[in-house]
């Protein structure tokens, strides 16, 4: 009897883990399955796990839907532009906080950490008025430009932790060879923190791709809508019958980039979140 | 500025880059100049220049996007400023704050709803995260796949598309979740009792919180009068004020992967020898968890509690996607941030909105400070 106990335990554990996995990924499965159903099937009172005759009708229709395609393009466009600037500026600021010894560094670093306590929502009202004065309402600018100023204290912190672990001798010897700070930053330090950079890039990407509140506030015409804003208009509370196959098709297409990025980046995320997330 | 929105933002971005580089040089030169005046060595001057040069983007952003907006919003919160009205705003003193704190029923609802999500949702979320982490920590084969599956909801989390999928699944009549509950309760009657019991407890708790909202406990009386739920009862998820918040909590629990990762790191940091020694002394797995793992995990629990509380006090997207425009449910679900959004951007009451954001800010600060003050009582740091 004693011999079988460990085996029994591991079978039980696998059962638990598998059922948790099924539960956690169920929404994803359901989203895909519903996108292949007909309208009758999504609203039927019986359970349709997988449609008998999967139909790609919703997919074919959504590729003809100009507003959807446009919002897809808008999302890709704005996320790329915002991501590039934010990532570079965060990399620069992390370099200042980790590799250079300058007067006032600790004070500025402490200030940066304390901004994590300020909920971003406390700033949205005055920022809105500020962007209104600049005539930026109805443009992509308010979604992109603030990030260029190294937006995201947590991300700076994560990258700074990674950069601090590189031995000091490395940049000192580069100095002796006559390299400037910009050269050391770009050619010596950044190639050594590729994994944390990938993590930061992933988090920034996910945050921008999922962002709803800011685009909703600033983009006021349908041809500028990003995906989350457009998709939220597909669900209309005033209709008694929702076009679920269409909505779920849009949902699948919205989540595909997230899943691809996560698949490639999960290795880095799972390590660096844990290492640097906690030392605060 | 060109009419084309894409060209427009590309130009603005290019201009911003130039501006940031210029301010980097300006700040760097200014700092070096001061260092030179103070007669420091050339190495020191060089470092001063480089430090301010590289940190300038953040410093400039901090001034433009944090300090100045905070100052303005503090000022506006004492005025009746509205974007739609052309006439200048007038000073109203503490009027906004007085109305907000003592007369505004919607704001009170939003605080109590947010409190509900924090008091009931957060512990459930953390418990589930800990449960998953403990299971993963058994070092089984395929751990990586499970870990990915548990973390994926964090990535998908608050995306509108995924939230709409939840909306579909939570449909009371035809939604898959209730369909499964119905099928299972018919197949196993004991589960039916469990289901009805949970429904009963849930409804009483929520009715009590709704009573706090309105000051009238008639709904709670009704739930009590109705007694133990009938046999064919199912949760009413996104249909009834009694369930609207539970749906949000379900989403929070689903997205517990980030907390799980933190717990996993904590469990990994516990020295194996401690467990081995306890095992030799004959401690059971259960005892070892509560006497060894749990106390050593308290710093990680504390971290999750602080971060989780800040984020649950700021919850917005799920409520927007699930309940926007749903008038009968709004008062039972609006969160503080949702209310801030509604006031500022549907009604354009900037002065009032600023007052709301300052109250939210102060609430979050108070809660965080209290947590840091209380941590000595239960968080164990001095082990290793």
Image (cartoon, coloured by chain):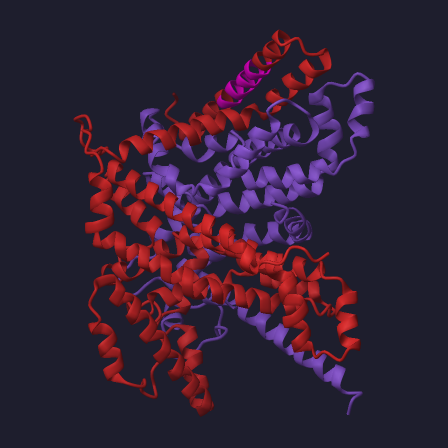
Chain colours: A purple, B red
What residue lies at 35% left-to-right and 53% top-to-bottom? B320
State yes or no: residue B63 in magenta.
no
State yes or no: residue B18 in magenta.
yes
Give the camera-side residue of B164 and A47.
Answer: B164
What residue lies at 20% left-to-right and 30% top-to-bottom? B91
> Residue A42: x and y, percent?
39, 70
Give the total number of marks visible in the rendering: 0
What residue lies at 79% left-to-right and 34% top-to-bottom? A167
Q: In which quarter of the image is the N terminus of chain A?
A: bottom right
Provide the residue span drawn in magenta.
Answer: B16-28
Position of A244 relative to A132 (above/below):
below
Position of A271 relative to B344 (above/below):
below
Give the camera-side residue of B361 and A30.
Answer: B361
Give the camera-side residue of B257 and A154.
Answer: A154
What secondary structure characterizes most of the magenta part?
Answer: helix
Res A190 seen here:
yes
Q: Quadrant of residue A105?
A: top right
> Residue B247: x and y, percent?
39, 66
Res A25 seen here:
no
Q: Quadrant of residue B203?
A: bottom left
Give the camera-side residue of B84 and B96.
Answer: B96
> Residue B210: x and y, percent?
27, 66
Position of B268 relative to A68 (above/below):
below
Q: Quadrant of the C terminus of chain A?
A: top right
> Residue A234: x and y, percent?
35, 54
């Amino acid at each position: 009897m004693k011999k079988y106990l460990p085996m029994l335990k591991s079978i039980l554990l696998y059962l638990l883990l598998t059922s948790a996995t099924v539960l956690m990924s169920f929404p994803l499965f359901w989203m895909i399955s519903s996108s292949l159903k007909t309208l009758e099937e999504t609203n039927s009172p019986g359970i349709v796990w997988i449609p008998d005759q999967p139909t790609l009708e919703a997919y074919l229709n959504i590729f003809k839907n100009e507003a959807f395609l446009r919002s897809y393009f808008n999302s890709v466009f704005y996320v790329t532009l915002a991501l590039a600037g934010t990532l570079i500026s965060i990399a620069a600021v992390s370099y200042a906080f980790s590799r250079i010894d300058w007067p006032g560094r600790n004070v500025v670093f402490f200030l940066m950490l304390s901004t994590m306590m300020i909920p971003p929502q406390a700033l949205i009202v005055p920022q809105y008025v500020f962007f209104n004065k600049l005539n930026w309402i109805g443009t992509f600018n308010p979604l992109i430009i603030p990030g260029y100023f190294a937006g995201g204290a947590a991300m700076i912190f994560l990258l700074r932790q990674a950069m601090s672990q590189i031995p000091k001798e490395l940049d000192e010897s580069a100095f002796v060879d006559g390299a400037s700070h910009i050269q050391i930053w770009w050619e010596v330090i950044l190639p050594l923190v590729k994994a944390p950079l990938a993590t930061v890039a992933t988090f920034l990407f996910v945050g921008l791709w999922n962002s709803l509140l800011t685009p909703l506030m600033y983009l006021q015409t349908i041809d500028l809508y990003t995906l989350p804003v457009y998709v939220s208009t597909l669900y209309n509370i005033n209709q008694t019958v929702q076009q679920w196959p269409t909505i779920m098709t849009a949902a699948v297409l919205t989540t595909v980039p997230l899943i691809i990025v996560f698949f490639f980046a999960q290795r880095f995320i799972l390590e660096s979140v844990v290492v640097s997330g906690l030392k605060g | 500025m060109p009419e084309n929105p894409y060209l427009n933002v590309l130009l603005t971005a290019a201009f911003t880059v130039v501006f940031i580089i210029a301010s980097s040089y300006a700040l760097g030169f200014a700092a070096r100049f001061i260092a030179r005046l103070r007669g420091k060595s050339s190495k020191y001057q060089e470092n001063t220049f480089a430090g301010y040069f590289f940190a300038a983007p953040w410093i400039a952003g901090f001034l433009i996007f944090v300090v100045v907006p905070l100052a303005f919003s503090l000022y506006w919160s004492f005025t009746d400023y509205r974007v739609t009205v052309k006439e200048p705003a007038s000073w109203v003193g503490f009027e906004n704050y007085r109305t907000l704190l003592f007369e505004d029923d919607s704001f009170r609802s939003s605080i109590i709803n947010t409190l509900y999500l924090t008091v009931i949702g957060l512990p459930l979320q953390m418990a589930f995260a800990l449960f998953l982490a403990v299971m993963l920590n058994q070092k089984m084969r395929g751990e990586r796949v499970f870990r990915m599956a548990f973390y994926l909801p964090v990535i998908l989390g608050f995306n509108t598309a995924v939230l709409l999928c939840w909306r579909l699944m939570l449909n009371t009549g035809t939604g898959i979740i209730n369909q499964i509950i119905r099928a299972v309760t018919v197949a196993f009657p004991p589960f039916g009792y469990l289901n009805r019991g949970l429904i009963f407890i849930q409804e009483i708790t929520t009715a009590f919180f709704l009573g706090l909202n309105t000051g009238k406990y008639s709904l709670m009386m009704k739930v009590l009068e109705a007694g133990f739920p009938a046999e064919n009862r199912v949760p009413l998820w996104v249909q009834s004020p009694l369930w609207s918040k539970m749906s949000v909590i379900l989403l929070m629990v689903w997205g517990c992967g980030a907390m799980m990762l933190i717990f996993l790191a904590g469990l990994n940091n516990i020295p194996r020898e401690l467990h081995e020694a306890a095992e030799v002394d004959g401690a059971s797995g259960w005892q070892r968890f509560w006497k060894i793992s749990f106390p050593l995990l308290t710093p990680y629990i504390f971290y999750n509690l602080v971060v989780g509380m800040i984020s649950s006090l700021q919850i917005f997207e799920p409520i927007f996607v699930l309940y926007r425009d749903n008038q009968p449910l709004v008062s039972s679900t609006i969160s503080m941030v949702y209310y801030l959004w509604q006031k500022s951007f549907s009604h354009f009451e900037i002065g009032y909105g600023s007052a709301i954001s300052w109250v939210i800010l102060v609430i979050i600060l108070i809660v965080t400070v209290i947590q840091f003050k209380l941590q000595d009582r239960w968080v164990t740091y001095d082990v290793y």
